[in-house]
Amino acid sequence: YTLRELTEKDMAGVLQKVAAMGFEGVELAGFGNLNADTFAQAVKECGLTVISAHIGIDDLLDDLDGCVWWASVIGTKRLTIPGIHPEDLEEDKIEETASKVNDLIIKLKFAGISLSYHNHDFEFENGRFDRLMEHCPDLKIELDTYWVKYAKADPVQIMKKYARRIVLIHLKDMLDKKDLTHDDPNPVLMTGKINVKAILRQAENANIPWGIVEMDRTEGDSLEDVAASIVNLKKA
């Protein structure tokens, strides 16, 4: 997702550059200018693991067999819902939403695929996140630590609370400024005000296998910012 503008033109080239930076895996958010088969070949050639793929809940509900097919082609065992509309997580809608999610979890499990959920900030308002987790006990978590912090919650405490369910974390940093907005960019990791080291320590304590560098918007050149981020992470 961070490199979406580049992958739309040259997914294979971007994968090669990411691998050369020292990344071991990628999370998919669309195939860019490739399809499932050509993406699978490109990712194999540069030795990267496909950690997860983001796929909207409506796409899963509309064409689950198709999603399972391309997941098998690209070699991922995890699909991640990038978000659910806030209204569908309210008390009057949560049972209907959870029924759909739980059904997907069961069907995907038969196909050897695990389902996880990626948060933004709004899930930590009005108890939406806890409500979803309570009603979907087998749903795994891809915790976006930035949006937890943006919602004025503590990423480390949330990681501790849901330690057994978090399988992936999004690592991103936050500008040191007042009145942040959703449109503000993410600075290079370890240069902002989020305590990334504390998040990394808790991830190790909880045996979370993957941390994913993500920037919704970069301050500078996206490839350069991603490269600087992994250098800083390795130092940390």
Image (spheres, rainbow, N blue to C red):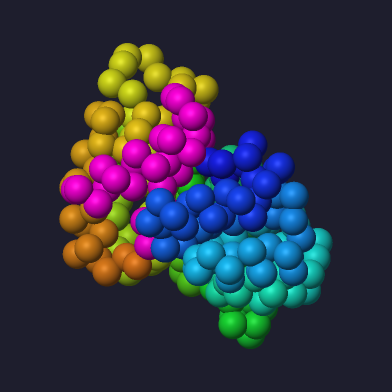
In the image, 185: left or right of 190? Answer: right
Give coordinates of residue 47: x percent, y percent: 50, 69
Residue 46 percent across, percent down from the top left:
53, 65
Determine if residue 206 is in view.
yes
| Residue 160 placement: quadrant | bottom left
Indicate whether 67 appears above or below 129.
Answer: below
Please name whichever residue, 64 or 103, is drawn nearer the observer in this view of the structure: 64
Above or below, 85 relative to 43: above
Q: What residue is drawn where x is 28% and y is 29%?
A: 192
Q: Quadrant of the N terminus?
A: top right
What residue appears at the point 26 percent right and 30 percent down from the top-left corner? 191
Measuring from the top left, give residue 190's x and y in whole percent. Answer: 26, 37
Give the magenta range.
210-236
Let me know if residue 226 is in the magenta part.
yes
Q: Residue at x 37, y 29 (%)?
A: 187
Comparing 176 with 225, the one in front is 225
Residue 95 drawn above or below residue 87: below
> Is 111 one of the magenta-colored residues?
no
Q: Quadrant of residue 50?
A: bottom right
Residue 61 visible, this orientation: no
